[in-house]
Every structure is written in structure tokens, then in C-alpha cells.
Amino acid sequence: MAFKFQNILNHRKTILDKKYTELSEVQKRVAMINLAIFDVQKSLESFKKSYSAQVAGISDIYGYNTLETGYKSLQYKLNELLAEQESAERELEIKKKSVIQAKIEYEKINKLREKHLAIDKINELKREEAVASDFASNRFIRE
């Protein structure tokens, strides 16, 4: 006998797959942000190491302002990326929770399907046993 909630099970599976896809997109975004943060941090370290050499080569205030603006823009970008990372990690936690909830909902229906299949199997075995018993009874009567 067919499982009467198969459509619901299929729908729950579709929702679960969608939630996994959303989670992987957010995980990818977090990884990209972390790479960008790493790059900006390396740029800042490099800037700090070469700062004294760059300052020694500056002959006017314009050069100094350019150097200062470069440093401030790197700091700003780093702070912006850190804020974006925090936001993305919060979103990641929300997506993880939604995946867990979708998995629970899917498993509820799937367990029901498994019970249904087990009951069908038991009923099938009972029918086979009854048929075998009928054959045995009919043979015994004929002899």
C-alpha cells in the first residue's frame, strides 16, 4: 500500500534541500569575508613595516596626507569587513537553526513512512503465511 503522506515527505525534503543550499551560500559568504579580512590585515602589516621608509621619502604635506589617507582607508575597510563578518556569522547561526528545524520536520514524516513500511511488511508476511496455510490445509484434505 502506498504511503499516503508521500507528497508531504517530498515537500519536506525539498524544503530541507533549500535550507542546506541557503546554509552553504552563507558559509561561502563567511569564507569570502574571512579571506578579505586576511588580505586587508596583511596589507596593514605591510603598510606598517614600510611606513618609516615611505615617510623618509616624503618631501611635502601632500605626500604625507596621501600616506595617511591610505592607512585610514585600510583601517576603515578592515572595520567594515569585521562588521560584515559579524553580521554574516549571525546569519549563519540562524541558517543552521533553520536547517536543524527542517531536518526535524523531515525526519518526523520519514519515521512515519518507515513505520508504515514495517506494518506493510508484517501484513504481507501474514498474507503469505495465510496462503501457505491454506495450501497446506487443502492438500491435507485432498489426500
Image (cartoon, helix red, strand yellow):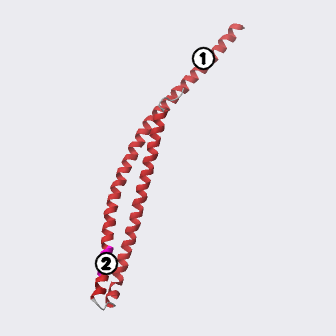
* Residue 113 x %, y %: 48, 32
Q: What element carries label 2?
A: helix
Measured from the top left, where is residue 57 in percent x and y?
34, 90
- On the rendered structure, is 136 left or right of 126? right
Q: Is residue 69 magenta?
A: yes
- What is the magenta segment's predominant secondary structure? helix
Quick one: SS at disc 1?
A: helix
Magenta span of residues:
68-74
The residue depicted at 68 percent of the width and 10 percent of the height is 140
Mark 2 → mark 1, Cα distance in angstroms: 86 Å
- Residue 41, image quadrant: bottom left
Task: Choose top left, top right, bottom left or bottom right for residue 47.
Answer: bottom left
Q: Is residue 83 left or right of residue 18?
A: left
Residue 130, disc: 1
Q: Name the residue under label 2.
A: 71
Residue farthest to the right, as pictured: 143
For the residue marked with disc 2, what is the amino acid? Tyr
Nearer the camera: disc 2 or disc 1: 2
Q: Residue at x 53, y 28 (%)?
A: 2
